[in-house]
Amino acid sequence: MAWSRTPLGIAFGGLFALSGALGIGRFVYTPILPFMAEALDLTPSEAGVVASANLLGHLAGALAAAQLRMPGGPRLWLLGGLAVGAATTAGMGLTAAMPMFIALRFANGVAGALVIVLAAALVLDRLAAAGRPGLSWMPFGGVGAGIAASAVLVSGASAHGAGWQTLWLASGALALLGLVACACLVSEAPDSRGAPRRAAPAGTRPRGLSVLVVAYGLFGFGYVITATFISQIVRTTPEVAPLEGVVWLVVGLAAVPSVAFWVWLDARLGKCTALALACLVEGAGVAASTFETSAIAVLAAAAVLGGTFMGITALGLIAARRVSTGNPTRILALMTASFGLGQMVGPTFAGYAYRIGDSFQAPSLAAALALFVAAALAFRLRA
């Protein structure tokens, strides 16, 4: 049997896809932002607008994924999304104009949303059909792997004098490797094993889906403020500024095994309990980080962020796929759109709320509150 048709090979294909599109393409903005802000004199509000452009694209891409007919098949669109993601990441290093930053990050967000929706639909369904749902954590673990790889790249290259433009070009090249690996490991042909999923009666909506969608959107808002600005916060806090290169690496390394842990816990606790607990833990971590700026507190906040945000991302999509009937792509796209809406609002809100006390304390507390509300909604779904 070809490696690309084995469950493990397919799972690794999803891992490399999300590593390139999200771990690098989406999240490398965080460690590069301090270098851009310093060289281009970007304000927090301008940085937030650029980040939100990416997340608006994420929302648009998710909505498009729910409607696209996809001539040529979903694999072709998945690989196309990875190609656009790598190109727009590298493209950030070829301009210094704010309108181009916004356009490139928007296009990157569209591509990233297509990748996560299509990778989740292709990979999770084929793993379930093959009787290997326990491997469903691997694609989402790829985001942490991409974050860790980009953290090492940015830290190492900047230590040797690379400027922000070179960092973007190198990150685009690294993201391109995700495309190559996915092309080798994820084939078009669906796994023939397993019974086809039943079709949903017309006009029906899976029970609890609306609550799940709202909770997922609140999570998107709650995590993204810290995820966008943590490197900038560290650089501008003298007590912990030397940790700038380490903090994002801690986020990535914590994210890789976290998905397996939360999926394992979800299998033992049942309906959305693990999802609620993860939101609670992340909310507590975000709230605590606003009151303490010691090295231990900053590293703990990075570990909590990395140890929860991809777990919650995975649990939300897995829960949506679990309640879906028929083709899961539309429901996965709806979840991703809600997530994208929350993400889109977060950085712009944080950038302007920064003006309250010239700190990220107020927006971070708002993010923690959103996560606590998401946890409460997820607990409702246990019944």
Image (cartoon, grey):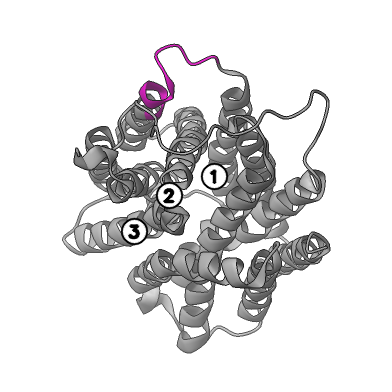
User: Which label number is shown at residue 145?
Assistant: 3
Q: Give the quarter of the figure containing the N terminus.
A: top left
Counting residues from the N terminus, which is met first, the one under dot 3 or under dot 1? 1
Q: Is residue 365 toward the left or the right of residue 254 in the image?
A: right
| Residue 260 horizontal/vertical position (percent) | 45, 66
User: Which label number is shown at residue 29?
Assistant: 2
Q: Kindly indicate the quadrant of the structure image that contains residue 76.
A: top left
Amino acid bearing label 1: Ala
Counting residues from the N terminus, which is met first, the one under dot 2 or under dot 1? 2
Q: Residues within 10 Å of mark 1 (few under 14, many from 20)?
A: many
Question: Label 1: which residue?
Answer: 51
User: Which label number is shown at residue 324?
Assistant: none
Q: Residues within 10 Å of mark 2 (few under 14, many from 20)?
A: many
Q: Give the quarter of the figure containing the C terminus.
A: bottom right
Say what secondary structure mark 1 lies in.
helix
* Residue drawn 55% across the image and 83% down it: 293
Residues 200 and 379: in front is 200
